[in-house]
Amino acid sequence: MLTYILKRILIMVPTLFVISVLVFTLIELPPGDYFESYMAELEAQGESVDREQIEYLKQEYGFDKSPVQRYVIWMGGLLQGDLGYSFEYQLPVNDVVGDRLFLTMLVAFVTIIVTWLIAFPIGIYSATHQYSWGDYGLTFLGLLGLATPNFLLALVLMYLANVWFGTAIGGLMDTKFINQPMSWDKFVSILEHLWIPVLVIGTSGTAGMIRTLRANLLDELQKQYVVTARAKGLHPLKSLVKYPLRMALNFFISDIGKLLPTIVSGAEVVAIVLSLQTTGPLLIRALQSQDMYLAGSFLMFLATLTVIGVLISDIALAFLDPRIRLSGGETK
Amino acid sequence: MTTNSVLPQPGAELPHYVNETPFDPKAIERLSPLQEKVYLASQWKLMWWKFCQHRLAVISGVFLALMYLSILISEVLAPYDYLSRHTDHLNAPPQAIHLFHEGRFIGPFVYGYDMHKNMDTLTREYTSNRTKVQPLRFFCTGESYEFWGFWRGNLHLFCPAENGQAFLLGTDRLGRDMLSRIIQGARISLSIGLIGISVSIVLGVVLGGIAGYFGGTADLIVQRMIEILQSLPSIPLWLTIAAILPVTWPPILVYVFITIILGLFEWTGLARAVRSKLLALREEDYVLAAQLMGARPSRIVGRHLVPGFTSHLIASATLAIPSMILGETALSFLGLGLRAPITSWGVLLTEAQNINIVALYPWLMLPVVPVILVVLAFNFLGDGLRDAADPYK
């Protein structure tokens, strides 16, 4: 077991390295850099450009060096927990991202919980009542959530929430609470606003989860041990929950890692529509203005989080299921 | 011992018995004509029968076939040219089709609009005028268009009455007919799914094939590649790449590139499926036989192994198309995907970006209806295909 965990952690290192190179290349690819677009913008507005200051900044952040050198500098900073410097906000990336990252994680976490809470009972019901009207109806509902583009659902829900409940449009809390320390009122305000993004982001993941749980549970329910348990008079509920459900749950654990990128993806788009104070709008703005350290470090951070998520779910799975830690492709 | 026993007495001579009917050694195994049909049917025929049992999948399949056929003749199906502006009818709401006017049957017609500007709300208000009866014309000549951008034509399936309007789904802020734009947008939105999935199938089969057939190091590398791609959140990744595209590129090149991007990141699921199938199939005897006869790995995989699960591949590919169609809408919505003058459902939905639209001009959100329908249809079709993929189960 220990060797398995060690092996997995060792594999993580090259994975993260490749990801970092990939991210860096992607960020570097667009022609020009932040300063060029910044100068162009200033000149377009008819303002004078302090070329000396720009040149100084360029040197300061190593824009006169080769990409490889810059990668090394960036990576070295990352390893020490320094995410670099955001040109646009003129602040260290750590400060720009900090608060928003917490809110992003909050939205993602609540979304995962809500997705599970919805998908779990529906999946079990669908599997135990296969081909019933309830099965068809709930599956259809789940698919409908999958098929509706997130951003439009967000818009419509935001409109309805405003019309029905009078919730202020957009944002993750009332504007008066922004930049305020956490308080009970702020917490309530966040909760009032949180349900729209959570519902919207959750809808797209729920359908897939219902489908997988249903399929897995159906496979288990057809096995002989279930028949034996029923024949011996075990209570139907117990013969469902005790073994088949536990087996079907494997994928819930293996899904944690995969769920995170999906949810972050969904959250980005929704965050822009709802103007949430999460990282989504920040990232897109950074990508457009080539604020490379902000965009790059943030992408890297998300990817690292996912890789760690996959690692944790893999280890948990290996604990639960010995078949997984022993398998692996052999050389032919 | 009773006398009515059928058994002869012990030791008694057995009576001689001959059954006169001719002996048919296959009498028990004989199949009814129906059974025979099933037994002799080819694999694809069995799949077809099984697929037909899934009603919803068949309906979805027909629906999708019609949609894809429609993109061949979008210009003819649309009542207007999708780019022409009707400046008298900006943001006009949809006109309903009526059949009866004052109790008299007229056939499909619409009531014309009276427009006046409301100076309090600064909006245009349209009221249907009950005296303007404008019957629709069918197979008529209307606005001219460029068929696929090559030939000029003016034949339409239906068009508004002479000097009348028929905006069945309303118009947008430039007075362009929404129905025509949705019909035209289908061409881009639907083809993106097909081209993207072709890219991912090729990548998935090649890389999944290498990983599954060779195993070992190759498997490890491909697995890591998949893990890396899957650990990057897709939308930020698409955004990053889409942000690279030079603004000066012609829209059609952007379209091709976006399609390839969508394909490049969707292959991981297919590759995993191919890999796990191959890991099992490569142990089969016929693979060993092919190897002993000197077949190259590419031939073994392509000629002998992949055909064994083509049906599964098609099913998973069908299930992967919706995410591309949705991906296109999301990218375009964020302004990083396709741009006008290219018209796709995603581009149309960018018009509905504002909450005011939801309140004032909700018909601008209508392009979402075909998106939902197509995504649902692909899901049902994919479910049906997956169930049918293994008819011997």
Image (cartoon, helix red, strand yellow):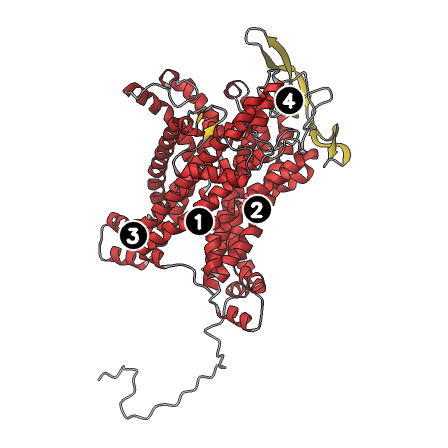
Residues tagged by mark 3 and mark 2 found on one chain of the structure: no
Where residue A13 appears, as percent x and y from the top left, is 41, 48
User: Does the CB distance between marks 1 and 3 fall below 8 Å?
Assistant: no
Give whichever of A108, B189 is nearer the camera.
A108
Nearer to us of marks 2 and 1 is: 1
Q: Helix, strand, or loop for circle 1?
A: helix
Instruction: Please rate how many residues cluster around mark 3, counting C-alpha atoms within 10 Å: few if below 14, some from 14 to 19, many from 20.
Output: few
Residue at the image position 33 percent from the left and 52 percent from the top: A5
Q: Helix, strand, or loop for circle 3?
A: helix
Where residue B96 appears, as percent x and y from the top left, is 59, 23
**CA–CA distance between discs 2 and 1?**
29 Å
Q: Taking the image as drawn, is residue A174 in sight?
A: yes
Residue A319 bears which disc, if any? 3
User: Does the CB distance between marks 2 and 1 fall below 8 Å?
Assistant: no
Residue A246 bears which disc, if any? none
Residue at the image position 62 percent from the left and 19 percent from the top: A44
Q: Which residue is mark 1?
A: A14
Q: Chain of mark 1?
A: A
User: Does the CB distance between marks 4 and 3 fall below 8 Å?
Assistant: no
**CA–CA distance between discs 3 and 2?**
37 Å
- In this picture, is B23 found above or below B96? below
Q: Which residue is mark 2?
A: B197
Residue at the image position 66 percent from the left and 37 percent from the top: B253
- B108 displayed left or right of A220: right
Q: Chain of mark 2?
A: B
Residue B110 bears which disc, if any? 4
Q: Taking the image as drawn, is residue B67 in sight?
A: no
Give whichever of B135, B340 is nearer the camera.
B340
**Residue type, label 3:** Phe
Q: Quadrant of residue B341?
A: top right
**CA–CA distance between discs 1 and 3?**
24 Å
**Residue type, label 4:** Val
